[in-house]
Image (cartoon, grey):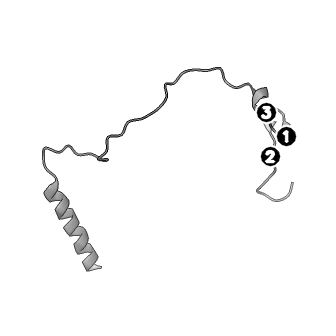
Amino acid sequence: MQGELNVIADSINKVQEVASDDVEPTANPVPLEAYLRPDVPETPLRREDALAGAPATESGMFVAPRILGGEA
């Protein structure tokens, strides 16, 4: 284990040698930008339209087979 710790310490020393005061610290070397579409309000989907293709509905909700908790 001492050999592994020496390798880690050597790696830390190498990084400290390369780092300089004119390099701004960063968490990611590649600049990240959020590529999001503009937030434009739209008319929401009506419940009837959302449920139109469902094989089963009840009280305005989708009905799905129980997968946990045993037989119903």
State the SS at label 2.
loop
Residue assigned mark 1 = 56
Q: Earlier in the sequence, mark 3 or mark 1?
A: 3
Q: Please state which of residues 2 and 30 is positioned toward the viewer in this rendering.
A: 30
State the SS at label 1.
loop
Task: Say the numbered circle drawn on residue 64.
Answer: 2
Q: Quadrant of the C terminus?
A: bottom right
State the SS at label 3.
helix
The type of residue carrying mark 1 is Ala
- Residue farthest right in this picture: 72
Mark 2 neighbour class, 10 Å CA radius: few under 14, some 14 to 19, many 20 or more: few
Where is residue 43? Give x, y as percent: 65, 20
| Count of numbered labels shown in the rendering | 3
Mark 3 and mark 1: span between their CA atoms?
A: 9 Å
What residue is shown at x 25% (from left), y 78% (from top)?
3
Q: Please state which of residues 53 and 64 is positioned toward the viewer in this rendering.
A: 53
Task: Say the numbered circle drawn on residue 51.
Answer: 3
Mark 2 and mark 3: span between their CA atoms?
A: 12 Å
Left or right, residue 6 beside residue 40: left
